[in-house]
Image (tube, rainbow, N blue to C red):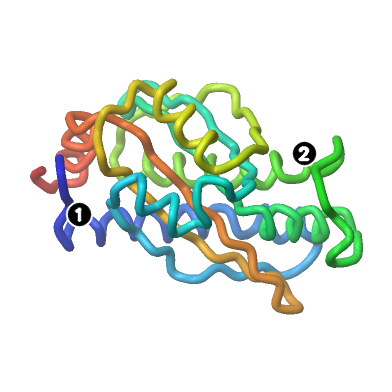
Amino acid sequence: MSQLDAAHLDVLREIGNIGIGNALTSLAQLLGGKVTMGVPRVAFLPLEEIIEGIGGYEELVSCVYMQVTGGVQGTVLFVFDERSTYRLVHLLTGQAPGTTTGLDEMGVSAVREVGNILTGAFVGALETMTGLAVRTGVPMLGFDMLGAVLSTSVIAAGYTEDQVLLIETVMVQEGGEEIRGHFFLLTQPEVLDRLFAALGLGS
C-alpha cells in the first residue's frame, strides 16, 4: 500500500481520537491535573520526511516501543522529542521547568509510564474498532538520537516500505505546557489491507 486516501486517513484519525479518549483519564491522574489533547494529525509519509519533521536525525528523543502480534502484526512506537521528554519529567516529578538536562532513573520511569499509557490506548482503540485481537509485547524505552531509534526499529521490525503511518498528538496540561508525541505503526502492506478490510474499507 503506497498511499492512503481521505477515507482511510479519516478512519485512522478516529482511532487516534478514541485512543486519546482512553488515555486522558489515566494521564490526568498521573500528571496530577487536567490534561487536554488536540485532534490528532494522521499521515502516511516517507520515513525521511517524518524524521525531518520531528527535528532531524540528531534530535534526542525518548521512545517507548513494543511488538504487536495477533490480528495486527508489527511494531508500535511512541516518540517524544527532547523538549517534550523533559517537560513530561517536570510534570510528573514536580521539578521546576528547565532543570532537567538528562534522564535519570526517575525520569526514565516517568516517561516510560506515560508512553505505556499512550501506546496501550492507541493499540486498544485499534483492537476495539477492528475487532481484531491484538496482543502486545513487553514495552521498552530508548533514549537516543531519532535517526538511530527509528532506523533500529525499522530494521528490527523487518519493515521494507518507504512510508510509515504516523499519528501526531499534542498534549497540554493546565498552565499551557505543550508536549508533542508521535505514534508509529510499522507493519507490512498486507496487514494494513487486513486492518482496513476489518473496518469495512478496501485497500
Closer to the camera in the image, 203 or 53: 53
Residue 124 badge: none
Q: Residue at x 17, y 63 (%)?
A: 6
Identify whether 105 is placed above or below 96: above
Between disc 2 and disc 1, the foreground one is 2
Closer to the camera in the image, 88 or 37: 88
Q: How many marks?
A: 2
Q: Position of residue 104 (x, y in %)?
A: 86, 39
Identify whether 25 is placed above or below 140: below
Residue type of the residue flagged with mark 2: Val
Q: Position of residue 64 (x, y in %)?
A: 59, 37
Q: Residue furthest front?
A: 58
Q: In whole angstroms, how far apart are the C-alphas of marks 2 and 1?
A: 35 Å
Q: Residue furthest left?
A: 202
Residue 8 badge: 1
Q: Which quarter of the rendered picture does the N terminus lie within?
A: top left
Give the side of residue 32 with respect to residue 67, left or right.
right
Residue type of the residue flagged with mark 1: His
Q: Residue at x 85, y 35 (%)?
A: 105
- Residue tagged 2: 108
